[in-house]
Image (tube, rainbow, N blue to C red):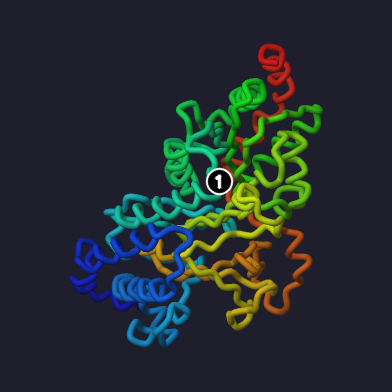
C-alpha cells in the first residue's frame, strides 16, 4: 500500500526548492560536454532523489522496501533504480500530471498493449530540450548550422502520443531548413517526396540528412535492392537511425546495415549515427562516429557517448551488481534531466561498457542464468517504432520502382 501523504510544500512544483534545482541542473548541462564535475553530479542526483522520494508515493514505497531514503544515500550509486516496466504500472511524476507539458507513451517494445506513461512539466521540458539539443548539435550536426532533413516518422500532429515524434519536431525546427519534412502520414510513406529529395540532393550537391527508425531504412534499402536503385548523395549527407539491426525485423546485421547505407545512398559508415532513445530516460545517447571522423581521431569502435549529466552502469541479471567493462549485462542509467520522473532507471536493454562509452547489444528475455555474449552481440538493439508506423512504412514501398522511374527522368 502506498503512503499517500500529501507532499510537503517544500517540494511543490512552484517551490523555491524545485525552481532552484531546475536552475542548477540547467547550468550543469550548459557547462557542456567537456564538463568534469563528479561532485556536482553527485550533489544534484541526491537532491533529485530527495524530491522524487518525497513526491512520488510508489517510488517512496519502493525505496523504503529497498531500505534507502534520502538521508541514507551518500552517493548517486546508492539511489534505487526503478525498473523501466514500472512506468507501465505507476504514474511516476513529481508534479500533478494534469499540469504536464509533455504527456505521451513509451513504444511498448516488450508488450505493445501495455505502454509506459511519461509526464514532464515545463521545467523538465526545458532540461530535455537543452540536453538533447546540445548532444544533437555535437554528434549529428557538428559541421552544419542547418540542413535539409527528411524524417521517416510521423509528425507530432499525427502522433502526439509518441515521444519520438515530439523530440524530432524539436530537432527539425532547431537544425532543419524550411523544406525539411515528415515522410509518414495516415496515407503511409510519402515515397514520392522521399525519392524526389534524394534525387534533388544528388543533382544539386546539397547534403541531405535522413532521420528515422532503423527498421524503416532497412525496408527501403531492401526494396531499392529489388529494383537495382541506387543514389549517390553528396558528401556531408548523413543518416541518423534509432533502433537496432536484427532479430525483430529480418536478417540484417549491423555490418550489413552500414553496407546498405553506402551501397543504396552513398553515405559512408562514419556519417551513419545510431541513437538510443527511450521514454523513461530523458537524455538520448548518440554514436561517436561522425564526431570522431570530423575531429580526425583514430578509427575506434562504435559506442554511445555518456553525457556529463548522465551516468551509465552495466549490471548482472541475477544480483544487479555492477559489471566490469567488457562484460554484457543490463544497462542502468542515471539522468539529471529526469527531474520530473526518477533519476535512476534500470532498463531491460543489454549492453556493455566500453573504454569511452557503452553500446546496446540486445534486449533481455528475462531468463535467469548466464548470458551468451556472442549471441547477444549478433542481435543488436530493439525496435522503437510502433506497429502503426511499421504498417505505414511498408504500405507504399511496392510503388517504389514506378515512382522512381518517373522522377529520375525529370530530375536526372
Give the quarter of the image for residue 111: bottom right
Is 342 above or below relative to 211? Answer: below
80 left or right, relative to 294: left
Residue 10 visible in the shown view: yes
Residue 394 drawn above or below residue 133 = above
Assign a secondary structure to mark 1.
Answer: loop
What residue do we see at 60% from left, 83% from top? Answer: 319
Looking at the image, the residue that sits furthest to the top is 410
Residue at the image point whose x is 73% and y is 78% from the top: 370
User: Residue 390: image x %, image y %?
Assistant: 62, 41
Residue 9, how many percent across, how many down?
18, 71
Residue 230 in the image: above or below residue 261: above
Q: Position of residue 257 (x, y in %)?
A: 74, 46
Give left or right: position of 260 versus 146: right
Residue in front for this viewpoint, 53 or 231: 231
Q: Mark 1 points at which residue?
A: 140
Residue 394 position, x and y percent, is: 66, 35
Amino acid at each position: 500500500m502506498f503512503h499517500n501523504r500529501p507532499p510537503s510544500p517544500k517540494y511543490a512544483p512552484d517551490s523555491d526548492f524545485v525552481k532552484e534545482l531546475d536552475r542548477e541542473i540547467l547550468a550543469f548541462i550548459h557547462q557542456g560536454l567537456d564538463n568534469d564535475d563528479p561532485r556536482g553530479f553527485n550533489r544534484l542526483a541526491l537532491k533529485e532523489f530527495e524530491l522524487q522520494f518525497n513526491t512520488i508515493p510508489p517510488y517512496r514505497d519502493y525505496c523504503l522496501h529497498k531500505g534507502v531514503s534520502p538521508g541514507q544515500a551518500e552517493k548517486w550509486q546508492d539511489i534505487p533504480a526503478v525498473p523501466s516496466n514500472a512506468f507501465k504500472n505507476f504514474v511516476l511524476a513529481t508534479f500533478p500530471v494534469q499540469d504536464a507539458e509533455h504527456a505521451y507513451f513509451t513504444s511498448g517494445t516488450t508488450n505493445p498493449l501495455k505502454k509506459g506513461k511519461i509526464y514532464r512539466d515545463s521545467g523538465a521540458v526545458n532540461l530535455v530540450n537543452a540536453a538533447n539539443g546540445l548532444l544533437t548539435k555535437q554528434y549529428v550536426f557538428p559541421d552544419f548550422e542547418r540542413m535539409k532533413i527528411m524524417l521517416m516518422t510521423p509528425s507530432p500532429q499525427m502522433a502526439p502520443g509518441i515521444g519520438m515524434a515530439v523530440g524530432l519536431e524539436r530537432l527539425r525546427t532547431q537544425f532543419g531548413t524550411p523544406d525539411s519534412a515528415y515522410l509518414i502520414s495516415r496515407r503511409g510513406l510519402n515515397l514520392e517526396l522521399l525519392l524526389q529529395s534524394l534525387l534533388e540532393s544528388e543533382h544539386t550537391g546539397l547534403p541531405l540528412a535522413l532521420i528515422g527508425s532503423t527498421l524503416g531504412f532497412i525496408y527501403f534499402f531492401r526494396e531499392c535492392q529489388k529494383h537495382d536503385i541506387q543514389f549517390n548523395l553528396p558528401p556531408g549527407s548523413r543518416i541518423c537511425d534509432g533502433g537496432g539491426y536484427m532479430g525483430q525485423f529480418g536478417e540484417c546485421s549491423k555490418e550489413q546495415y552500414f553496407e546498405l547505407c553506402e551501397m543504396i545512398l552513398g553515405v559512408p559508415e562514419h556519417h551513419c549515427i545510431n541513437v538510443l532513445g527511450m521514454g523513461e530516460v530523458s537524455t538520448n545517447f548518440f554514436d561517436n562516429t561522425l564526431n570522431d571522423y570530423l575531429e580526425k581521431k583514430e578509427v575506434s569502435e562504435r559506442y554511445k557517448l555518456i553525457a556529463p549529466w548522465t551516468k551509465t552502469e552495466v549490471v548482472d541479471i541475477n544480483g544487479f551488481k555492477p559489471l566490469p567493462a567488457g562484460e554484457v549485462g543490463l544497462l542502468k542509467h542515471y539522468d539529471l534531466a529526469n527531474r520530473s520522473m526518477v533519476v535512476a532507471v534500470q532498463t531491460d536493454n543489454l549492453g556493455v561498457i566500453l573504454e569511452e562509452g557503452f553500446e546496446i547489444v540486445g534486449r533481455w528475455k528475462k531468463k535467469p542464468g548466464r548470458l551468451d555474449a556472442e549471441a547477444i552481440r549478433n542481435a543488436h538493439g530493439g525496435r522503437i517504432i510502433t506497429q502503426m508506423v511499421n504498417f505505414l512504412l511498408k504500405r507504399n514501398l511496392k510503388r517504389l520502382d514506378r515512382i522512381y522511374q518517373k522522377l529520375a527522368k525529370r530530375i536526372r
